[in-house]
Image: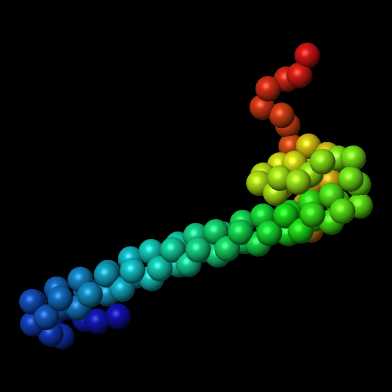
Amino acid sequence: MMRPGFFRRDVEFVLRLAGGFVVVGAFALTLAWGYEQRQQAQEWRELACAYRVADLASRAKFLGLDDQRGACARLQSLGLGVRTSGLPSFPARDPLPRY
């Protein structure tokens, strides 16, 4: 890249330090952007579950699905969970066994 001695020592040090900050900043910015995208995807998933529960409640009155909180968990318990990707996955296991 640069031959040693092209600039004065202190200028080279500042340039290397600035380059390091740019690389670390780009990495941190990428992580922050990915985190934000994940949060938005979870919000959209919860909204889709809420609409699906509302539709199911209007069709099957006997289920009593008036409460929209935990809509994705409620759909999963009914076996109607929302797919999160196009790839096949293993079914989710219950954390506690039922006896």
Instruction: Between residue 34 and residue 6, name the one nearer to us.
Output: 34
Instruction: Between residue 52 and residue 38, name the one nearer to us.
Output: 52
Where is residue 32 shown, x and y percent of the image?
44, 63
3 left or right of 83 in image = left
**Quadrant of residue 98 in the image?**
top right
| Residue placed furthest toward the top | 99
The residue positioned 33% from the left and 66% from the top of the image is: 24
Instruction: Between residue 81 and residue 54, name the one nearer to us.
Output: 54
Q: Reply above or below: 98 against 84.
A: above
In the rendered image, which quarter contains the C terminus?
top right
In the rendered image, which quarter contains the N terminus?
bottom left
Where is residue 4 shown, x and y percent of the image?
17, 78
Where is residue 79 shown, x and y percent of the image?
84, 40
Q: Reply above or below: 44 against 68.
A: below
44 left or right of 22 in image = right
Where is residue 8 shown, x and y percent of the image?
8, 82
Q: Reply above or below: 51 against 19.
A: above
- Is residue 60 in view from this perspective? yes
- Is residue 87 in view from this perspective? no
**Quadrant of residue 86 in the image?**
bottom right
Instruction: Between residue 62 and residue 44, name the one nearer to us.
Output: 62
**Quadrant of residue 89 in the image?**
top right
60 left or right of 8 in image = right
The residue positioned 76% from the left and 46% from the top of the image is: 66
> How many marks on residues?
0
The residue positioned 66% from the left and 46% from the top of the image is: 69
| Residue placed furthest toward the bottom | 6
Q: Specify the color scheme.
A: rainbow
The residue positioned 61% from the left and 59% from the top of the image is: 43
